[in-house]
Structure formats: C-alpha cells, structure tokens
Amino acid sequence: MPTRQSYIYIMSNFANSTLYTGVCNNLVKRVWQHRNGQGSVFTKKYSVTKLVYYEVFEEIIEAIIREKQIKGGSRADKLKLITQFNPTFKDLYNDISK
C-alpha cells in the first residue's frame, strides 16, 4: 500500500509575534482551513494565518515525532529553523497551492 505524505508546519501571524506548529496529511487544505478560521481555536484567536515553514515526510509517525521535537524546543529554536528556511517570513501558501 502506498504511503501518503505527511507534513509538519509552522504558521505565524502578520507581525510574526505568534507561532503555531502543527502536523497534517494535506498541507494545502490545512493551511486553507487556518486562513479561513476553520483551523484550531488558537490560530483563530491569534490570527495565525501565514505559513512560514514546513517539512515533508513519507510516514505520519515521522511527522508526529518531528512535531513533538519542534514543539519541545524554544521559541529561539523555532525562529532559527524558520529563518534558515524562509529568511523573510514570506507567506508560503501561494507557493504550495499552485
């Protein structure tokens, strides 16, 4: 049976002051949900609508392990990860939704 790709992602608000880390198996759909107020209560409350980082995995268990690793790190660790991947904190949603 073929595996389905999974993702971990980090989203931010407009001012890049709030970060949210999540895991999913359909990144385009999940980010769309966050952007349209259908994501988590946290992202809706803090207007976290900008995709700033993501990683792709072949197995969901790998994505879950990585999500826990990222969530267990400090804010500085998350910012370093983001800036290495996306130095300008560009919203990556348009890049993935094409």
Image: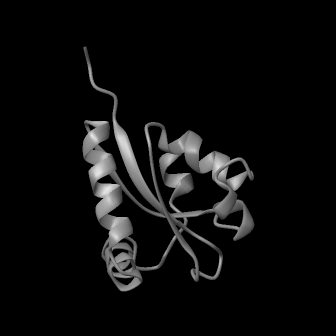
Q: Is 52 left, or right, of 48 in this rendering?
A: left
Q: Considering only vertical position in the picture, is 54 above or below 80?
A: above
| Rendering colour mode | one colour
Work out whether residue 84 or residue 71 is closer to the camera in this orientation and state it: 71
Residue at image point 40% right, 72% down: 86
Note whether residue 33 is visible: yes
Q: Position of residue 2 (x, y in %)?
A: 26, 19
Q: Is residue 48 left or right of residue 27?
A: right
Position above or below: 72 against 66: below
Tell me where residue 73 sits by quadrant.
Answer: bottom left
Q: Residue at x 43, y 37 (%)?
A: 25
Res 80 → quadrant: bottom left
Q: Tell me if I can see residue 98 in this picture.
A: no
Residue drawn at the location 33% of the way across and 48% of the way down: 64
Instruction: Give the quarter of the figure containing the N terminus.
Output: top left
How many marks are shown on the rendered structure?
0
In the displayed orientation, state which residue is furthest to the top. Answer: 1
**In this picture, residue 64 sits left or right of residue 11:** left
Instruction: Between residue 44 and residue 86, name the one nearer to us.
Output: 44
x and y percentages locating residue 68 in the rendered image = 33, 59
Q: Position of residue 5 (x, y in %)?
A: 33, 35
Q: Is residue 74 above or below residue 32?
A: below
Q: Residue at x 58, y 40 (%)?
A: 29
Q: Position of residue 88 (x, y in %)?
A: 46, 79
- Judging depth in this view, the residue of 75 and 16 nearest the camera is 75
